Image (cartoon, rainbow, N blue to C red):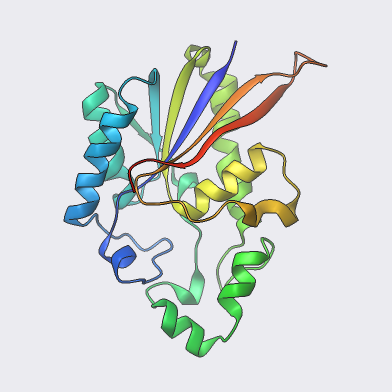
């Protein structure tokens, strides 16, 4: 018995295209982003998905709705799948942040415990998003030998992937560079030494057309 988990990043937004930090700002998909969502739906069609849960932010929800329409499923919304809150950085370009806080973005990328001013750390994001998966593991009985799709954000998916795999905090930065509408794919199976517990394995990182 195994349970597959597919983590899909939303399609492109204008903020993505212009290197602007959106965090939990509620931005919309660009025309290219909508096309990416449709391409992702085609790629995911035959993977046995029977449940879709999405971040409540528009860019993720709209991506999830495209996939759900293709799979004839409903979308459940959960705000715990939101992107990292970037505090004072939200809405600023990378260059603006670098000018105001030299070296801070590099520190943020490499230290999962560090948070932008008035924002949250990658560890914070890992903890809240992991709760969603643990609840599904407990309550979604139809998950056995099937797949669940979570539609979220690059930072959230990276943090969630790392914590499910049981990585050390220092290893979290190994997961980076997830393209718009690309996926992280994991599988949960009973542990060989204790089949009452679950071991997560990764099948793919950054899989997709972008």
Vertical comparison of 162 with 67: above or below: below
Position of residue 92 measured from the top left corner of the image (x, y, whole percent): 39, 78
Residue at left offset 28%, top offset 42%: 63
Vertical comparison of 184 with 29: above or below: above
Nearer-the-camera pick, 27 or 1:
1
Position of residue 172 measured from the top left corner of the image (x, y, whole percent): 66, 53
Residue placed farthest to the right in the image? 193
Q: Does residue 16 appear to the left or right of 98 in the view shown? A: left
Residue at left offset 47%, top offset 12%: 142
Tell me the quadrant of the picture where the N terminus can be found: top right
Q: Does residue 102 appear to the left or right of 45 in the view shown? A: right
Q: Is residue 163 visible?
A: yes
Position of residue 101 measured from the top left corner of the image (x, y, whole percent): 55, 86
Residue placed farthest to the front in the image? 209
Q: Is residue 117 visible?
A: no
Residue placed farthest to the bottom in the image? 99
Q: Does residue 189 appear to the left or right of 73 in the view shown? A: right
Vertical comparison of 198 with 36: above or below: above
Position of residue 102 measured from the top left corner of the image (x, y, whole percent): 57, 86
Q: Does residue 164 appear to the left or right of 186 in the view shown? A: right
Vertical comparison of 84 with 202: above or below: below
Location of residue 94 (image quadrant): bottom left
């Amino acid at each position: 018995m195994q349970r597959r988990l597919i983590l899909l990043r939303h399609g492109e937004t204008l903020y993505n295209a212009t290197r602007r930090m959106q965090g939990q700002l509620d931005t919309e998909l660009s025309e290219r982003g909508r096309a990416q969502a449709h391409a992702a739906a085609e790629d995911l069609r035959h993977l046995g998905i029977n449940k879709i849960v999405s971040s409540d932010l528009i860019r993720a929800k709209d991506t999830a709705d495209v996939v759900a329409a293709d799979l004839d499923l409903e979308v459940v919304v959960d705000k715990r799948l939101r992107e990292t809150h970037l505090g004072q950085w939200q809405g600023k370009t990378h260059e603006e942040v670098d000018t105001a806080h030299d070296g801070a973005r590099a520190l943020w990328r490499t230290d999962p415990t560090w948070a932008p001013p008035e924002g949250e750390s990658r560890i914070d994001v890992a903890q809240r998003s992991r709760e969603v998966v643990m609840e599904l593991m407990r309550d979604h009985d139809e998950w056995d030998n099937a797949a669940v799709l979570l539609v979220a954000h690059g930072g959230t998916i990276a943090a969630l992937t790392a914590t499910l795999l049981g990585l050390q905090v220092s290893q979290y930065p190994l997961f980076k560079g997830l393209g718009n509408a690309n996926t992280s794919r994991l599988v949960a199976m009973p542990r060989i030494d204790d089949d009452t517990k679950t071991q997560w394995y990764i099948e793919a990182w950054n899989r997709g057309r972008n």
